[in-house]
Image (cartoon, rainbow, N blue to C red):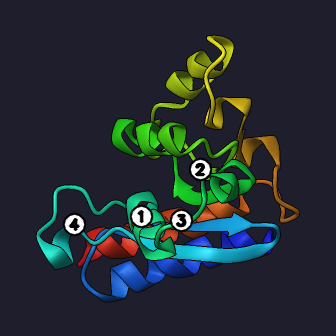
């Protein structure tokens, strides 16, 4: 499995261990993780600390050129808010662990690209398209196990 997708899954597991929702993300620039995060809505009582937003926040202030050369890996398809942030920062690639549990705003990213905008519309990859080197469905199965553990309590 892809090293960075594995890191995002590890972040999701951290979130679950803290009593939160198991969604994780990492921001990668030139092969180095510059930000990692997980959903902290429950832990922090926050309406906005989704995994992608947490990874961006923890990356700190970076030059615009860094975002334009980065990839964000997330365990679950980004929601409208996170997709908007990805587009705003001009992050050109999003690697999505799975989008069957929740289908986020992948169409919004594609529309932005076709309209000549910047950001994630350039490449949105899914587990079912075998973006990583693991067996097909590996990320989805791992993420679903985390999700099932979170629901079991």
For the residues labelled 2 and 4, the Cα–Cα distance comes to 20 Å
- Residue 69 lies, in percent from the top left, at 75, 53
Q: Secondary structure at mark 3?
A: helix
User: Which dot, 4 or 3, sits closer to the camera?
Assistant: 4
User: Which picture quadrant has residue 10?
Assistant: bottom right
User: Which picture quadrant has residue 20?
Assistant: bottom left
Q: Residues within 10 Å of mark 1 (few under 14, many from 20)?
A: many
Direction from residue 23 to residue 36 in the image, left or right: right
For the residues labelled 4 and 3, the Cα–Cα distance comes to 18 Å
Q: Secondary structure at mark 4?
A: helix
* Residue located beneath label 1 in the image: 51
Judge whether residue 140 can be spotted in this image: no
Evaluate if marks 4 and 1 touch, with contact meaning CB atoms under 8 Å apart.
no
The first of marks 2 and 1 along the sequence is: 1
* Residue located beneath label 4 in the image: 41
Evaluate if marks 3 and 2 touch, with contact meaning CB atoms under 8 Å apart.
yes
| Residue 143: assigned label | 3
Q: Secondary structure at mark 1?
A: helix
């Amino acid at each position: 499995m892809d090293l960075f997708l594995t890191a995002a899954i590890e972040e999701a597991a951290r979130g679950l261990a803290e009593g939160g929702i198991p969604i994780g993300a990492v921001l990668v620039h030139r092969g180095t993780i510059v930000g990692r995060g997980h959903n902290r809505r429950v832990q922090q009582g926050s309406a906005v600390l989704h995994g992608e937003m947490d990874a961006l926040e923890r990356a700190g202030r970076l030059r615009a050129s860094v975002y334009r050369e980065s990839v964000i890996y997330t365990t679950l398809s980004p929601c409208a808010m996170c997709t908007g942030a990805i587009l705003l920062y001009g992050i050109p690639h999003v690697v999505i662990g799975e989008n069957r549990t929740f289908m986020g705003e992948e169409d919004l990213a594609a529309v932005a690209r076709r309209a000549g905008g910047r950001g994630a519309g350039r490449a949105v990859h899914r587990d079912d398209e075998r973006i990583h080197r693991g067996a097909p469905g590996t990320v989805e199965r791992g993420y679903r196990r985390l999700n099932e553990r979170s629901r079991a309590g």
